[in-house]
Image: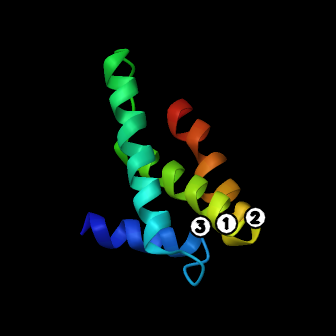
Amino acid sequence: MEHVTFLVVVVIIVDDKLVTPPMVFAGLIGAILWNLLTWLFGLPSSSSHALFGGLIGAVWVGAGMRGVHFDTVLQKILIPAPARRSG
C-alpha cells in the first residue's frame, strides 16, 4: 500500500509526463546517499522524505522548473511539516 501512496504523491508533486527513468534513478541514488550520510553522522532522517527530495531535485535538474509543481510541494509538504511537529 505504501508504494501506491508514494506514486500518488509523486504524480501530484511532479509532472509525470516529463519524468524519465534516469531521473527516478538519480532521485533514488540521492535518497540513498542522504540516508547514508545522516546515518553516518547519527542524525535522524526519514527515508520517505529523502525519496521525495531526491525525486524533486532530479526532476528539477532534468526537466527544469516546469517539471515540479512547487505550489503543491509548498502546500502538501513544506507547510504541513512544522504543524505536525508542534501538534
Reply above or below: 10 against 85: below
Picture coordinates of residue 21 (x, y %)? 43, 72
Residue drawn 59% across the image and 67% down it: 13
| Tag 2 residue | 65
Applied colour scheme: rainbow
Crowdedness near tag 3: few (<14), some (14–19) or many (≥20) residues, C-alpha within 10 Å? many
First in sequence, mark 2 or 3: give its number: 3
Residue that sits furthest to the front in the current view: 22
Q: Say left or right for 47 vs 30.
A: left
Picture coordinates of residue 87 (x, y %)? 52, 35
Picture coordinates of residue 32 (x, y %)? 35, 42
Foreground: 45 or 87?
45
Reply above or below: 41 against 38: above
| Tag 3 residue | 13
| Tag 1 residue | 68
Residue drawn 60% across the image and 36% down it: 82
Q: Say left or right for 74 vs 12.
A: right
Q: Amino acid at mark 1?
A: Val
3 or 1: mark nearer the eye: 1
Marks 2 and 3, how far apart at CA: 12 Å
Residue drawn 60% across the image and 79% down it: 18
Q: Say left or right for 6 vs 13.
A: left
- Is mark 1 in CB contact (under 8 Å) with mark 2? yes
**Which secondary structure, mark 1?**
loop
Label total for image: 3
**Which secondary structure, mark 2?**
helix
Reply above or below: 64 against 86: below
- Is mark 3 in CB contact (under 8 Å) with mark 1? yes
